[in-house]
């Protein structure tokens, strides 16, 4: 079956200016002076939606969901990638998009229908259906500025769906309407799906996503993170939200109270910075089970010394050692450090731990154990939280991939 919506490598980049004058200065310099920073709202998105199917776009605010719909509906051009939409497309995007507050509901609906490609005669034919479905009564002939947000949604949805489109994009707008009208809208969406409309659906309502969508895509920071069955995607999203909340909580505690640490060592080489990064290279304090993590340790020699052994140690809340290793045991050696010279060591590993709170200790020493010559031992330098992901539920500090099978004896 040919896809009604097809996209490959879709991306959107925006230029951000600190003040309007910077935009003018850059333009007058003919591109020779850069006064902007670049922000990718969307990157590397592939998707296909077949007729009669619904694709849900899930993610936090700012993850790129609305950008996808704006590109596919032609509201904004992509910076990279290609896409195709087969047939007539209708959209219910941002509240009030394309509507004029001084026009009546009838006038705004007429303009919306005309922009969808309907002839003046067809617009007149469809207007009674729009008025009947919107159920705004006498307000249909009143200026839009007198409408409540719920009435606004009623009019926008009614105009966009007055005639079944080949492709329909809905962006969270139904969340504003009352329960009665939401039920009407979902009934119409299901009717369209049954008749062959391809639906792109953005919502924070997990029940709506599960009931309407055949497939879902989780977006984070403008990139697709996970795609599959809506229930699995929503589970992944909930875990992601829990991770973000835990991350924010740990950072808030670091800011408010500081991290309770103990340091020891002769100071010949000192730890300057210890940081945890996620798979995207961003600073993180919370991780999903099994997610890749990167520990970056930066140090500096105060006098000429051999390259140190760099170690890490994870402890549970009770202070029990969970896991530890160092560059000596990993067979990693480095060049001698001159006085004042800095070095860096990075440990990459999967967070195969049970859900819960942990602390991380970093150390610089010689040989395999820090007791030989301890340069700098920084106890509990970081706190981190492990959040349950899509793995089966388990207890304990280890998260092992276990399979099971029944048989008859």
Image: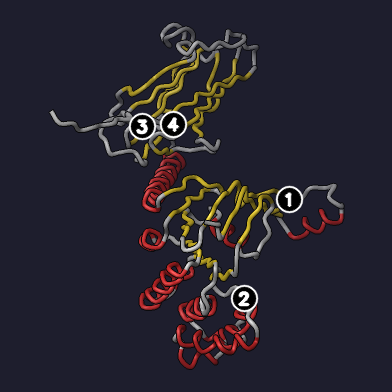
Query: Of label 4 and label 2, which has the lower sequence position?
Result: 2
406 or 213: nearer the eye? 406
Please name the residue shown 46% across and 55% down the image. 58
Residue 83, image x and y in percent?
63, 55
Horizontal side, residue 378 vs residue 403: left or right: right
How far separated are the C-alphas under marks 4 and 2?
Answer: 56 Å
Please name the residue shown 65% across and 87% down the image. 120
How far separated are the C-alphas under marks 2 and 3?
Answer: 56 Å
Check contact, mark 4 vs mark 3: CB within 8 A.
Answer: no
Quadrant position of the C terminus in the picture: top left
User: What label does residue 172 carry, if any?
Assistant: none
Horizontal side, residue 224 vs residue 210: left or right: right
Residue 31, image x and y in percent?
83, 50
Visible residue check, residue 344:
yes
184 or 354: nearer the eye? 184
Q: Quadrant of residue 190?
A: bottom left
How far separated are the C-alphas under marks 1 and 4?
Answer: 35 Å
Q: Name the residue under label 1.
A: 36
Tag 1, which secondary structure? strand
How far separated are the C-alphas under marks 1 and 3?
Answer: 40 Å
Q: How packed is label 1: few (under 14 Cα within 10 Å), some, or many (20 or more)?
A: some
Residue 338, image x and y in percent?
65, 11
Query: Of label 1 and label 3, which has the lower sequence position?
Result: 1
- Vertical placement of 106 versus 71: above or below? below
Q: Mark 4 points at which residue?
A: 382
375 or 296: nearer the eye? 296
Check contact, mark 2 vs mark 3: CB within 8 A.
Answer: no
Visible residue check, residue 175:
no
Please name the residue shown 52% across and 15% down the image. 267
Tag 4, which secondary structure? strand
């Amino acid at each position: 079956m040919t896809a009604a919506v097809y996209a490959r490598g879709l991306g959107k980049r925006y230029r951000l200016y600190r003040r309007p004058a910077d935009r003018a200065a850059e333009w007058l310099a003919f591109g020779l002076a850069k006064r902007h920073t670049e922000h990718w709202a969307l990157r590397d998105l592939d998707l296909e939606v077949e007729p009669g199917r619904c694709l849900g776009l899930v993610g936090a605010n700012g993850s790129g969901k609305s950008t996808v719909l704006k590109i596919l509906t032609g509201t904004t051009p992509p910076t990279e990638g290609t896409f195709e939409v087969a047939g007539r497309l209708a959209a219910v995007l941002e509240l009030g998009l394309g509507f004029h507050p001084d026009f009546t509901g009838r006038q705004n609906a007429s303009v919306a229908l005309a922009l969808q490609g309907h002839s003046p005669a067809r617009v007149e034919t469809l207007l009674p259906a729009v008025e009947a479905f919107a159920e705004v009564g006498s307000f249909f002939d009143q200026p839009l500025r007198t409408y409540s947000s719920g009435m606004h949604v009623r009019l926008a949805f009614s105009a966009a769906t007055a005639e079944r489109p080949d492709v329909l994009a809905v962006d969270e707008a139904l969340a504003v309407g009352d329960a009665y009208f939401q039920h009407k809208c979902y009934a119409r969406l299901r009717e369209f799906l049954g008749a062959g409309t391809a639906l792109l659906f953005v919502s924070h309502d997990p029940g709506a996503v599960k009931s309407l969508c055949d497939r879902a895509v989780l977006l984070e920071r403008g990139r697709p993170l996970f795609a599959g069955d809506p229930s699995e995607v929503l589970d992944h999203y909930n875990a992601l939200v829990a991770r973000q909340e835990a991350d924010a909580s740990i950072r808030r505690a670091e800011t408010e109270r500081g991290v309770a640490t103990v340091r020891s060592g002769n100071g010949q080489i000192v730890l300057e910075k210890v940081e945890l990064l996620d798979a995207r290279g961003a600073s993180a304090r919370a991780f999903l089970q099994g997610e890749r993590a990167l520990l970056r340790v930066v140090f500096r020699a105060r006098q000429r010394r051999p390259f140190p052994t760099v170690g890490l140690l994870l402890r549970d809340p009770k202070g029990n050692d969970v896991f530890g290793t160092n560059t000596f045991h990993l067979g990693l050696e480095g060049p001698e450090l001159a006085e004042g010279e800095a070095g860096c060591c990075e440990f990459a590993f999967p967070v195969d731990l049970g859900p819960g709170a942990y602390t991380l200790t970093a150390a610089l020493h010689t040989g395999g154990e820090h007791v030989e010559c301890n340069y700098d031992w920084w106890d509990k330098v970081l706190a981190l939280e492990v959040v349950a992901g899509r793995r089966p539920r388990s207890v304990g500090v280890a998260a092992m991939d276990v399979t099971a099978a029944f048989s008859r004896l």
